[in-house]
Image (cartoon, grey):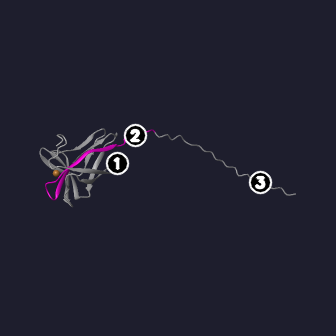
Amino acid sequence: MRRAVLTAAALAGALALTGCSESGSDSGQADLSVSSPYMPQPVSADMAAGFLTIANQGGATDELTSVTSDIAGEVTMHSTVGGAMAEKTSFAIPAHGRLVFRSGGNHLMFEKLKRRPKQGQTVTVKLTFAESGPVTVEMPVKSATYNPSTGH
Ligand code: CU
């Protein structure tokens, strides 16, 4: 008589899960939105200006680090201080704050234009942020004298 020896494979599966709960810290991130973009129809054949507002509803600062466009060989960021403009390599968007580009103040400069934008057209602009990554904006071309504060 033969005895079958059954080997019991004991599965010692001690599933000791450590309680790793993530506390929802949604205030620790930038939350950006872009509004009121526009480009006055350029009077120059090789240069144009652009304006927009970037709001940050999040709890962390972000930074605009570069701007590119399909119509320009280069887009630079400028601030205007005391009537003189200075090129900047980045602009901060503070937590719960705003970064405003407007006529007479901070502005984008589209250089080496590949075509001359006309009123009624739209220009594609890619904004790159240090934390939030790239954001693409469709920027409408307005009249050369357009000013959003007066509506003209
Ligand atoms: Cu400028």
**Which circle marks residue 26 in the picture?**
2
Q: Which of pointers 3 and 1 indicates the residue nearer the eye? A: 1
From which residue to which does the magenta span run? 23-50
Nearer to the camera, 116 or 85: 116
**What residue is disc 1 on?**
132
Distance Cα–Cα, label 2 vs label 3: 56 Å
Q: Amino acid at mark 1?
A: Ser
Neighbours of disc 2 within 10 Å: few (<14), some (14-19), many (20+): few
Distance Cα–Cα, label 3 vs label 1: 60 Å
Q: Earlier in the sequence, mark 3 or mark 1?
A: 3
Measured as percent of width and height from the top left, residue 141 is found at 21, 51
Give SS at disc 3.
loop
- Residue at (17% x, 56% y) in the render: 47
Q: Amino acid at mark 3?
A: Leu
Nearer to the camera, 85 or 11: 85
Distance Cα–Cα, label 1 vs label 2: 14 Å
Is the N terminus in the top left, top right, bottom left or bottom right quadrant?
A: bottom right
Q: Amino acid at mark 2?
A: Asp
Q: Quadrant of residue 61?
A: top left
